[in-house]
Image (tube, grey):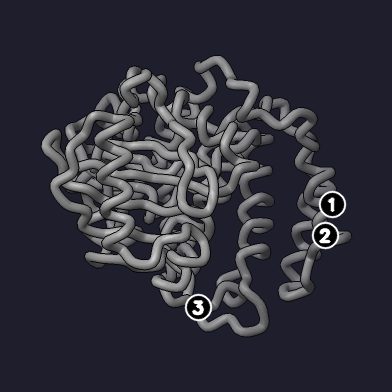
Amino acid sequence: MTRGAPTQCAPLPFSYHGRMLPPGLSMLWEQVEPKEALRERFGFDEFAAVSDWVSKVLDEVWAISVVACGRMVISDHNAIVWVESSHGPFVVKWSRSQERFANLEASARLLRVLDRQGVPVAAPIAALDGRDRVMLDGPLGPLSIAVLPELSGDWLDPEDVASVWAAGACLAELHEALRSNPVDQMLTTAGVAGLTERIVEWIAHQDRGLAPVASHRLKELVANLPELDDEPQLVHNDFRAANILTRGSNIIGVLDFDEMQWDHRVSDLAKASIYLGTRFTDWRPTPAAVRQTLRAGYESVRPLGPVEAGWLDALILWQAIQAIPGTDDPAGWAQAL
C-alpha cells in the first residue's frame, strides 16, 4: 500500500520473524551462554529436550502435531520456539515471570480483539479448552504459554522512508484501535502520574548526569508546558524495528504486545521516535530525519494538537537522555542529543 492509501496497517496473511534468526538455540540480546541460560532459567538440558516437551504440550493442549522445532531464543525469563506442524508453522511463546501472568493473559485476549478489527497482529491460537494463553508446569515451575501463527516479513528498515512513514501511520491507527476497546483492568495502572510530575521526579532522583545540558533544557521545557488534556490509555510501549514487520513498504505485522502499559499516546510516539531503529543487540540513535518521517506518518492519521506537539519535543528529549547507556557510549547516544 502506498502513501495516501486509506490505511497503512494492512492486514495480510503473514508470519512471525523467526526466519531472520539463527537456527537452533540462541540468546535474543544477552551476551551469555544459551545452553546455560536454558538450563538455569527453564530446567532443560538441551534444545532437543525443549523440542520433545513442546511437541507433547502442543499435542495434548492444542491438538497440534509437531513435525520439527527449528529454533529457539531466550530473552530474560521468556522464550520463543518456532515449530513446523501438520497445521502449518507456529510460534510458541512462554514466560516464567509469575508476577506478569495476569497481564500476559489479558494482552493475549486483547490481541484477539485487535485481530478481529483488522489490526495486523498475531492473534493467539486457542487451546482445546478455548483459552488464548495457558499456564502449565515446566521443569522449574509454572510457565504462561501462548501459541501464535508464524508471521513472515522483513524487520523495518529505518532507512526506508516509505516504510518509516507507514510505521508512523500504523502506530496512530493502533492507538485508535486500543482507545476504542474496553480497557481490561488487568492491563491498567491506576493513578498514572501527570507528565510534569513524572519528569520533574526523574530529573531530581534518577537522572545520571550523563547529559547535563540536555537535562537542563528538558527541565526548562517542562516548566513551560501545560498538562496534557489527552487521557492516558493502553499503548504498545515497544514500537521499534524488531517488532515491526514489513513487506515492501507496507506494515504487515506489529509484534510483542507483552510490554503494553497505561500512558499518553504522545509518550508512546516519543519512545518509538527514539528507539525505532533498534534491534536486539544493535542499538543506535534514530536520526532526526527518521523521527520527522515517523511523526509525519503518525499525523497523517492523527494530527497532534499544539500542547501535544510541545510535549512530544520534551518527551523525545527525555527518552533520548534515558537511552544513553553510560560513559561508554560507542553508538553515540549522548552525541546525538
Disc 3, disc 1: CB below 8 Å? no
Number of the label disc, if any, that sits on residue 331: 3
User: Taking 302 as reference, is 125 left or right?
Assistant: left
Residue 28: % across, % down: 40, 64
**Residue for badge 2:** 203
Specify whether residue 34 is in view: yes
Disc 3, disc 2: CB below 8 Å? no
Residue 107: % across, % down: 50, 31
In space, the residues marked 3 and 2 are separated at their CA atoms by 24 Å
Q: Quadrant of the N terminus?
A: top left
Identify the mark nearer the N-term, 3 or 2. 2
Please state which of residues 128 and 183 is positioned toward the viewer in this rendering. Answer: 128
Instruction: Name the kind of residue labelled 2 in the image.
Output: Ile
In space, the residues marked 1 and 2 are separated at their CA atoms by 5 Å
Asked which secondary structure carries label 2, the reply is helix
Disc 1, disc 2: CB below 8 Å? yes
Number of the label disc, if any, that sits on residue 200: 1
Please state which of residues 252 and 8 is positioned toward the viewer in this rendering. Answer: 252
In the picture, residue 157 is in which quadrant? bottom left
Crowdedness near tag 3: few (<14), some (14–19) or many (≥20) residues, C-alpha within 10 Å: some
Asked which secondary structure carries label 3, the reply is loop
Instruction: Name the kind of residue labelled 3 in the image.
Output: Ala
Instruction: Name the kind of residue labelled 1 in the image.
Output: Val
Specify whether residue 162 is in view: no
> Residue at position x 25%, y 35% from top?
59
